């Protein structure tokens, strides 16, 4: 477990979610429990150091660019009205083409939050992401809001 993962506190909103081992670069991953025909909804958390002049909107742009590599037709919408308060929201709809499956219309809701650290020269951003089939993502709104509302990171020294 990374130091960042050890510093993350997050509440699982219900027994309908289960934590799983996150992939490299991700500090938290939960998946929805149940039967799903093609895609199991997930909530993930990443923490990254920001470049000196980078904004949270820049982080949203990087995330959107990654999804454009999966689907060049991905469509996104950024709400940066809360950027001064240290928060940017982004929604991205994209198509995933996976072998043996029909094309899947997925959507991501991304919440990008500026984090305080003990060292004012170090700027971090935490990104909390819900990924689900676009037609069903609304079913997970309340749970996602609970994930986001409970997420905190100890602002101790950064390695």
Image (cartoon, rainbow, N blue to C red):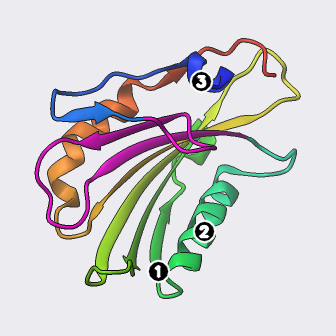
Q: Earlier in the sequence, mark 3 or mark 1?
A: 3
Which element carries disc 3, helix, strand or loop? loop
Q: Which residue is mark 1?
A: 74
Q: Quadrant of residue 117?
A: top right
Residue 91, label in figure: none
Q: Position of residue 140 (x, y in %)?
A: 20, 48
Above or below, 14 against 23 in this view is above
Image quarter where the N terminus lies is top right
**Which residue is depicted at the point 57% across and 25% down?**
5
Q: Is residue 23 magenta?
A: yes
The alpha-carbon separation of the residues under discs 1 and 2 comes to 10 Å
CA neighbours of label 2 inside 10 A, class few (<14), some (14 to 19), many (20+): few
The magenta-colored residue range is 21-48
Relative vertical location of residue 124 with respect to residue 36 in this rendering, above or below = above
Which element type, helix, strand or loop, lies under badge 2?
Answer: helix
**Residue named by callout 3:** 1
Which label lies toward us, 3 or 1? Answer: 3
In the rendering, at what x and y percent does residue 39 appear? 25, 62
Q: CA distance from mark 3 to mark 1?
A: 32 Å
Please say if the residues under marks 3 and 1 sit with CB atoms less than 8 Å apart. Answer: no
Q: Residues within 10 Å of mark 3 (few under 14, many from 20)?
A: few
Q: Are marks 1 and 2 in contact (CB under 8 Å)?
A: no
What residue sits right under mark 2 in the picture? 66
Separation of marks 3 and 2 at Cα, in angstroms: 25 Å
Q: Which residue is located at x 23 percent, y 27 percent?
A: 13
């Amino acid at each position: 477990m990374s130091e960042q993962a050890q510093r993350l506190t997050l509440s699982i909103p219900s027994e309908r979610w289960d934590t799983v081992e996150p992939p490299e670069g991700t500090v938290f991953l939960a998946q929805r429990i149940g039967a799903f025909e093609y895609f199991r909804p997930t909530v993930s958390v990443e923490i990254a150091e920001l470049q000196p002049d980078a904004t949270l909107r820049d982080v949203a742009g990087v995330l959107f660019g990654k999804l454009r590599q999966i689907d060049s037709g991905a469509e996104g919408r950024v709400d940066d009205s809360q950027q001064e308060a240290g928060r940017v929201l982004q929604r991205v709809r994209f198509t995933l083409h996976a072998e043996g499956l029909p094309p899947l219309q997925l959507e991501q809701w991304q919440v990008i939050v500026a984090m305080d650290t003990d060292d004012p020269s170090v700027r971090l951003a935490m990104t909390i992401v819900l990924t689900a089939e676009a037609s069903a993502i609304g079913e997970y709104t309340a749970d996602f809001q609970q994930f986001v509302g409970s997420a905190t990171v100890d602002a101790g020294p950064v390695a």
